[in-house]
Amino acid sequence: MSESAPATTELTSQYSSQVAGDLERNLKEQERLSGEIEALQGQLDALRRDHTVLLNIQQVLGTQATAVSPTTPPAASVPAPRKKAAASDERPGTRKSTAPTGKQAGKQAGKQTGKQTGKKAAPKASAARSGPTLVDLVRDHLAEQKEPRSAAEVSTALGRQHSERTIKTTVVRTTLEGLVARNQAQRTKQGTSVFYTTPDAGEPAARSEDGSPQSD
């Protein structure tokens, strides 16, 4: 008996501690849930108040719509016969003719003819004022030279003589090749350089690799 008493006392103490801990946790859980319930209850009360306000607004709007609807005129207030009569007023014979009269047609034709004549005359006048073509300038320049000239040299010389015109080396080279194709110019190649001269210029003078004439 004396040995079992301490064991029983120790076991009872353990159970007591465990029960006390469970009670404490239970109280804390109750407090937590109570707080959540109060918060949810507050949200529910707010939603209920909003619901009541919305219902009142809906009832007011419904009353106003009912009060206004009897005074609203019907959609089809114009009788059908009146529409037909309005449509019948627009007859083909009653419309004003928009076609021009004989005098107006003659004036318009004269204006158009004058415009077309002016447009045709303008290019001719501009062509007459433009002077010689680039082909003529290149051919005449080669005829004046005693030794072959490259496309860049011809382009530079013509650009100085005719500063009012835009003369590009690529266009001059194309023009020179066209003269060669028509036997109005000759092409010689020295190294990587290409030179042009007129057919009656005689034997072209030799040039160095950089394109400058070589002395005898």
Image (cartoon, rainbow, N blue to C red):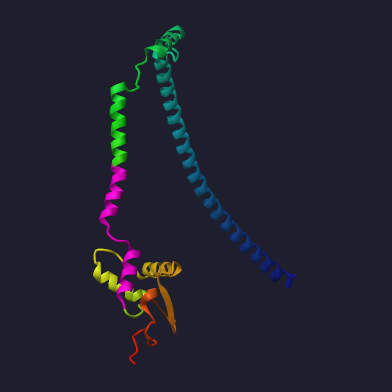
Q: Nearer the viewer, residue 35 or 22?
A: 35
Residue 8 x, y percent position in the rendering: 70, 67
Query: Can I make out residue 90 in this image?
Result: no
168 relative to 121, above or below: below
Q: What stretch is highlighted in magenta?
A: 118-145
Quadrant position of residue 108? top left
Q: Which of 184 and 48 is in front in this view?
A: 184
Quarter of the image with the N terminus is: bottom right
Does the magenta run of residues contain 133? yes
Q: In which quarter of the image is residue 12?
A: bottom right
In depth, the one of 19 and 104 nearer the eye is: 104
Figure check: 51 above or below 10: above
Q: Is residue 177 left or right of residue 156?
A: right
Q: Is residue 190 above or below residue 161?
A: below
Residue located farthest toward the right when viewing the structure as drawn: 1
Which of the 4 quarters of the picture holds residue 180? bottom left
Magenta highlight on residue 177? no
Residue 149 in picture, x, y percent from top left: 35, 77
Residue that lies at the very extreme toward the top in this rendered image: 81
Which quarter of the figure is the C terminus placed in? bottom left
Identity of the residue drawn at 31% across and 77% down: 145
Q: Picture coordinates of residue 39 (x, y %)? A: 48, 46
Residue displayed at 47% across by 32% down: 51
Residue 201 can be seen, yes or no: yes
Per the picture, the main secondary structure of the magenta-coloured stretch is helix
Q: Is residue 207 left or right of residue 2?
A: left
Residue drawn at 38 percent across, 88 percent down? 208
The x and y percentages for residue 34 are 52, 48
Q: Is residue 156 left or right of residue 88?
A: left
